[in-house]
Image: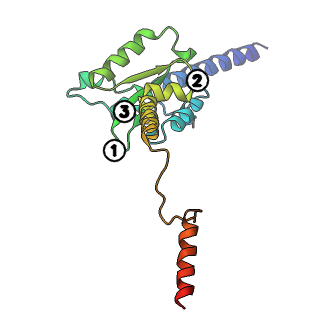
Amino acid sequence: MTWLIVFVVLAVLIGAFFSSTKINFDKRGTRNPIKAKRVLTMNEQPTFLRLKEALPEHHVLAQVSFNAFLTAKGYATRNLFNRKVADFVVLDNKFNVVAIVELDDSSHKGKEGKDAERDALIAEAGYKVIRYQRTPDIEKIKIDFGIQREEVVQESIAQEIKAEEPKTKLIGDAIIIQTDQDLPKQSENNSSASNAQ
């Protein structure tokens, strides 16, 4: 019986030793398995689709590393942004950055200071940051990107041109319609032609 107790205690100690060393190995850099994850969260997916719908002439990129659109000399400065990721980057047709779009959903509560630091880094490079609390509607996106104003201006110009157009227009290849005034002349011409015969 004593041997059984010693054996159980020894087994427990050996098990505890190996389980603690396994944890230490993981913390020290043992390679863990790599797993797939979604690129966009459930909150980001509708915003991505809405941006694409509202900005058809633009390219919308998701989950873009700050290193893709920011650079600096020296590691100390680059370390300020090298592990940061923007939710969305909107590019024009020439692949120039138009704006950085951030979705400040509930996961951003209490992180306003960090968001302000991120905005300052982006602004220092000369980029515009647009933040939304939730998925914006199409009109809001167009206004924020200055597209709505252009459409309104174009629409008002079109209305002014339409107002200046004459009420009647010349139509090429028109059909000539004979009026009553033209009839007597033709009958006189017909009677003089028959008298000549």
Marks 1 and 2 sit apart, C-alpha to C-alpha, by: 58 Å
Residue under label 1: 94
User: Badge 3 is on which residue?
Assistant: 98
Residue 175 vs residue 28, the one in the foreground = 175
Name the N-terminal-most of marks 3 and 2: 2
The 10 Å Cα crowd at callout 3, few under 14, some 14 to 19, many 20 or more, is: some
Q: Do the residues labelled 1 and 3 touch (CB within 8 Å)?
A: no
Closer to the observer: label 1 or label 2? 1
Q: Earlier in the sequence, mark 1 or mark 2?
A: 2
The Cα–Cα distance between marks 3 and 2, rounded to whole angstroms, is 55 Å
In the image, taking residue 72 as reference, residue 47 lies left or right, namely right
Q: Nearer the viewer, residue 151 or 84?
A: 151
25 left or right of 65 in image: right
Q: Which of 126 and 188 is in front in this view?
A: 188
Residue 118 location, x and y as percent?
A: 37, 18
According to the picture, the residue beneath numbered tag 2 turns out to be 18
The secondary element bearing badge 3 is classed as: strand
Q: Which of marks 3 and 2 is in front?
A: 3
Q: Image quadrant of residue 123?
A: top left
Decide: is 187 above or below 15. below
| Residue that extends furthest to the right in the rendered view of this protein | 1
Residue 80 shows up from this direction: no
Q: Residues within 10 Å of mark 2 (few under 14, many from 20)?
A: few
- Kindly identify the residue that appears in the image at 59 percent across and 25 percent down: 43
Residue, x 39% and y 38% (percent of image)? 91
